[in-house]
Each structure stands twice: as structure tokens, then as C-alpha cells.
Amino acid sequence: MTAKKKKLKETTIVQKHQKNFNALSKAFANNDVCLMDCIERATGEHVAVICAMHREEDGQIAMTPFAKFFNGNPYEMLISPLEYDESVKQKEGKDDVNKIGDSA
């Protein structure tokens, strides 16, 4: 009896957040969103947070945080996975060259 290998499907970070993105999209369509000033617990920094709003059974409005805005220029703070992979490949190539030079 041969065991069949089960191919594991890798989940991307975008797929992991798809459910939250869909909920946020629905909240925008229903005008149930707000922009709230929060304080980041780890740093004490003020951050602008996008929240979905809904009414609780007791009539209170609850806000669920979904996303925060960048404090700074996101183009300077982020790179795409493709750019990251390329930079790692370039670095590995330089390390290989250095190893060859060191062995002489």
C-alpha cells in the first residue's frame, strides 16, 4: 500500500487577510467606517486607524480596528517581495565572491 503525498498549499499573507479586507470593503460600502486616533502600545506613537463600526445589542457603537496609516513615507519604508528577493540574491552573490577571495 502506497501512501499518497499530500501537497500542502502555501497561503500568502494577502490570502490570510482577505476575510478582513472583505469585511472592511463591506463596511465602506455601508458607510460604517471611521478614522480614529489611537496610540500604539509598543511605542506610544499616535497612529491613525481605520475602524469598522457596528452597534452592539446594548446600543453602544463598537469600533473594530482594521488598518493603520503610515507615519512617514511608505515608499521609503516598504519594498515589494520581488525587490526583496532580488536584493537577497544580489547579496548572496557578493557573499560568494567574498568567500572565494577569502580562501586564497
Image: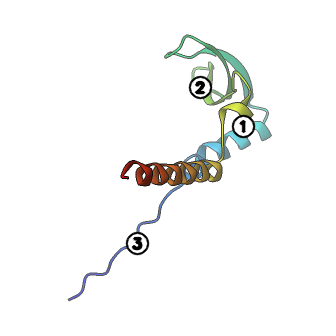
- Farthest residue in the bottom direction? 1
The CA distance from mark 2 to mark 3 is 43 Å
Q: Amino acid at mark 1?
A: Ala
Q: Position of residue 13 (x, y in %)?
A: 55, 49
Image-based side of 37 in relation to 15, left or right = right
Vertical arrangement, residue 50 with respect to residue 36, above or below: below
The reply to whether discs 2 and 1 touch (Cβ–Cβ < 8 Å) is no
Q: Position of residue 24 (x, y in %)?
A: 68, 39
Vertical arrangement, residue 89 with respect to residue 27, above or below: below
Residue at (25, 81) in percent of width and height: 3
Image-based side of 97 in relation to 25, left or right = left
Image quadrant occupied by the N terminus = bottom left
The residue carrying mark 1 is 27
Indicate which disc, 1 or 3, sits on the residue closer to the N terminus: 3
The reply to whether discs 2 and 3 touch (Cβ–Cβ < 8 Å) is no
- Farthest residue in the left direction? 1
The residue carrying mark 2 is 56
Please tell me how crowded label 3 is: few (under 14), some (14-19), or many (20+) other residues with Cα within 10 Å.
few
The reply to whether discs 1 and 3 touch (Cβ–Cβ < 8 Å) is no
Indicate which disc, 2 or 1, sits on the residue closer to the N terminus: 1
User: Which of 87/70 is in front?
Assistant: 87
Would you identify the image quadrant in which residue 32 lies?
top right
- Farthest residue in the front direction? 104
Badge number at residue 3: none
Residue at (65, 44) in percent of width and height: 21
The residue carrying mark 3 is 7
